Image: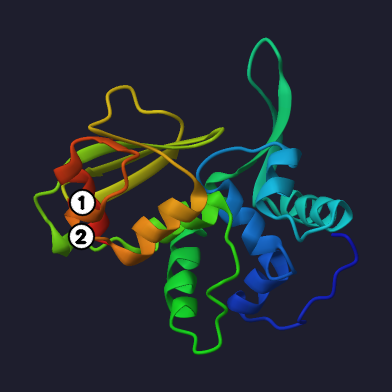
Amino acid sequence: MTGRRKYGDGCAAAHALDLVGERWGLLIVRELLLGPKRFTDLREGLPAASSNSLSLRLKDLEESGVIRRRKYGSPATVWVYELTEWGKDLEPILIHLGRWGRRSPVRDRETPSSVDALMLAMRSRFRPEADPALSMVMAIRLAQDLFSVKVDKGFLTIERGDPAHPDVVIDTDLPTLAILVRQAPPKEALPTDVKGDQEAAWRFFSTL
């Protein structure tokens, strides 16, 4: 480890905080939940983190077995960071932490979030009981960030990348998508950049 302080407590929860509780630790995990990223991509998602701080946390998480670094792509191979299978187990913890934090009376709701944070907010807000029969595949395109959003049999799956045959395509910007996720506008108020099955799009955002 990089000389960080530990709690010195035998509780497993305290040990978990030793591993991921340092500043930026869990947010790095958040940024990697939907797939691998280069260091520069992580810097874009966490602009308030200095390069030095981010490098230290990445080293800590790699030594702890939460993430790993590997070569990705061909032929122009680049180095990326990704979660290990054990690291992916942190997803439900982050989902519930987001739900808990959303009820905070002192949360600043004007502070911008990263693209990945907003996609994770979809997962935390998704209520399958609101529309049990919903089945659709949506492509969300935010400049260079592409996501596949699939709802089937009450399960929501979000992955990085463009789906092959989407029912709905949203080619938009982060502020517009944030409004759709957080406010669930009426059907007639869907923005013009929602293409394809408008009914399916409105039903999906209504479940949030």
Residue 131, percent across and down?
A: 13, 57
Residue 147, percent across and down?
A: 43, 37
Q: Secondary structure at mark 1?
A: helix
Nearer mark to the viewer, of 1 and 2: 2
Spatial CA distance of label 1 from label 2 is 7 Å
Q: In front: 79, or 188?
A: 188
Residue found 70% across the figure and 65% down from its top: 19
- Left or right of 168, for residue 63: right
Q: Secondary structure at mark 2?
A: loop
Residue found 28% across the figure and 41% down from its top: 150
What is the three-letter code of the residue carrying label 2? Answer: Pro
Vertical position of residue 186 compared to residue 32: above or below = below
Name the residue furthest left: 133
Tell me, for residue 19, which label it has, or none: none
What is the three-letter code of the residue carrying label 1? Answer: Trp
The quarter of the rendered structure image containing the N terminus is bottom right
- Which residue has dot 2 on it? 186
Is residue 75 visible in this depiction of the protein? yes
Residue found 60% across the figure and 51% down from its top: 31
Vertical position of residue 76 compared to residue 69: above or below = above
Q: Earlier in the sequence, mark 1 or mark 2?
A: 2
Q: Are marks 1 and 2 in contact (CB under 8 Å)?
A: yes
Residue 142, percent across and down?
A: 50, 39
Dot 1, how many residues are within 10 Å of its Cα: few (below 14), some (14-19), or many (20+)? some
Name the residue furthest bottom: 105
Number of callouts in the render?
Answer: 2
- Which residue has dot 1 on it? 202
Residue 70, percent across and down?
A: 70, 31
